[in-house]
Structures are given as structure tokens and as C-alpha cells.
Image (cartoon, rainbow, N blue to C red):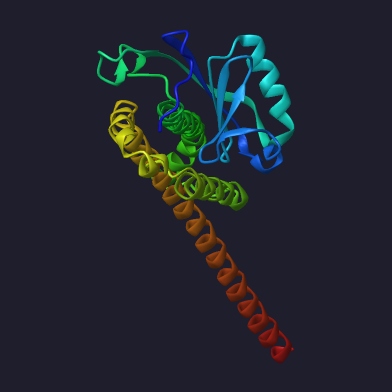
Amino acid sequence: MASEIFEETDIVEGCSLFLGQSIDLRQLRHIERISLSPFTIRAGAHGLAVLFRYGVVVLFGLQSVEVMKFLSDLQELVKDPFEEPEKESCDIYADPNMPEGLVQDRICLHAFTVESLQIVADVMAKSTVLAHYELNLTKHFDRIEPFAERLRRGRFGGLKGRDLLQHIGDTLMIEAKMTGRIEVTEKPELTWDYPQYERLYMRLEDEYDLAERHAAIDRKLGLISRTAQTLLDLIHNERSLRVEWYIVILIVAEIVVAFVEKAS
């Protein structure tokens, strides 16, 4: 049975923050929970917080001071926190006469139930993570573009294999997190328990372009990884060829020395 919340208002603000690589939710097991999956607790005087292990917290109905206090209390549980957390905000209003979904940059719900807000939190959390990696990959492209240009001109000498390996490692880590931990393209477990909210999720997923943005990130990851791998292979081939020439030179030198010694 869906549970009502925010009964005294018809509009609340939702705020999603990507705080770090993960949040240790086990440390919050002593706190009274509204739900375990997704992990949902009361926050502030009348607000709600939905926390995700992959490093995102989504807050509903908190004042600015309450947000600061909540994040301060949560800080010790965040692994590898970001210096500037990615943030997305959206007004959410309840109107039983309007279709549910994104309407003029605001999310409309038929009612403020915990379950419907958890669906909103899932979509906002995924969108915030996508926004973070979209920006991150833009920076990677800025760094890999000079390498690609040198490859086009056939001037790949002097490149450092360590830098290229770092690019490959970074892309693999992003891909693993997007696919294995965040599961951007997967429906939340909540829709299995409450199938009446599946339509709301599908609409928000479409309106936030989650699948398209995830596919675009996959393509960029593939391009960065292929470029770095190609350059790395060329560096290795160049080094192997150089070693072969050194060996040939040494053999020729030994033959020359042998002839000189025999002639004398």
C-alpha cells in the first residue's frame, strides 16, 4: 500500500547529488528506515532522503540549512568524495488531474507517495551520474584529441605508454561502474513490487533520455579506448622494431670485429 508524504503541500524540491565513488550504507543500519531498497530515511524536519550505494543521495523537501547538515553528517560515509559533486535539482508537484511525468521542467505526480518519490529519485540519481561522466568524458576527449591528431599525421613518437594506459584504465572503470553498479538501463526493483509505478518510471526514463545518454557515453568510451589502444600498440611496435635494429647493429659490429681480428 502506497504511503502518503508531504500532505500539507503540493510542491517540493528534489535535489540529487553525486557525492563520491560510493556510500557505505551499512553504517546507517542503526537509523530508522522507511525502505531498504532503495535505502530511504527521513531527513530534516519533514523531508525525505534516498541514498544509493554508488555515491548518490537524492533529497526531497529539505531547507538549505538542513541539506548542509545532512551532507555534513554523511561525509564520513562517502568513499573518494568529489571536490565538486554533480548536482541536479527539480521542482516536483502533486496534481491528480495532470499526467505524471516531466512537464515544463517540473515533475508532476498524482500524489506524494514514498514509492513515487523513490521512482523519481532513481531517475534523478541516474541522470546526475550520467551528467558527471558526460563532463568527465569531455575532458578525456580534450586530452586524447592531440594523440589522435598525432596518429593521423603518423607522428606518434615520444608518446608515453603510461598516459595511454591511464586513459584505457579510466574508461574501463567508468564502463564497469555504469554497467555493473549503477545499471542505468535497468528498471528499479521497486517496479516489480509496485507495478503501478512502472509507467511513471518509463516516462521519466524517456524524458530524461537515460538510455540515449548511456549509449552515447558507451560510444565515447569505445572511441577513447580504441584510440589509446591503437597508439599503445604503435608505441610497442616501434620499440620492438628499435630493439631489432639494435640487435642487427650488434651482430654486424661483432662480425666486423671478428673480421678485423682475423685480418690482423
Residue 17 coordinates in the image, percent (x, y) = 56, 25
From what the image shows, is residue 55 above or below residue 45?
Answer: below
- Judge whether 164 appears above or below 234 on screen: above
For the residue pair 157 and 205, the one nearer the viewer reads as: 205
Residue 64 placement: quadrant: top right
Q: Which of the two residues, 243 or 24, is positioned nearer the viewer here? A: 24
The residue lying toward the viewer, choosing from 176 and 51, is 51
In the image, farthest residue toward the front: 1
Q: Residue at x 58, y 75 (%)?
A: 248
Name the residue at 62% across, 51% down: 162
Relative horizontal placement of residue 33, taking residue 137 as reference (left or right): right
In the rendering, at what x and y percent does residue 1 appear?
40, 33
Residue 240, given in percent of the width and then of the height, sits at 55, 67
Q: Quadrant of residue 97?
A: top left
Residue at the image position 35 percent from the left and 38 percent from the top: 216
Assign the C terminus to one quadrant of the image.
bottom right
Q: Does 14 sit above or below residue 248?
A: above
Q: Residue furthest bottom?
A: 262
Q: Position of residue 179 (x, y in %)?
A: 45, 48
Say how many tags the image has.
0
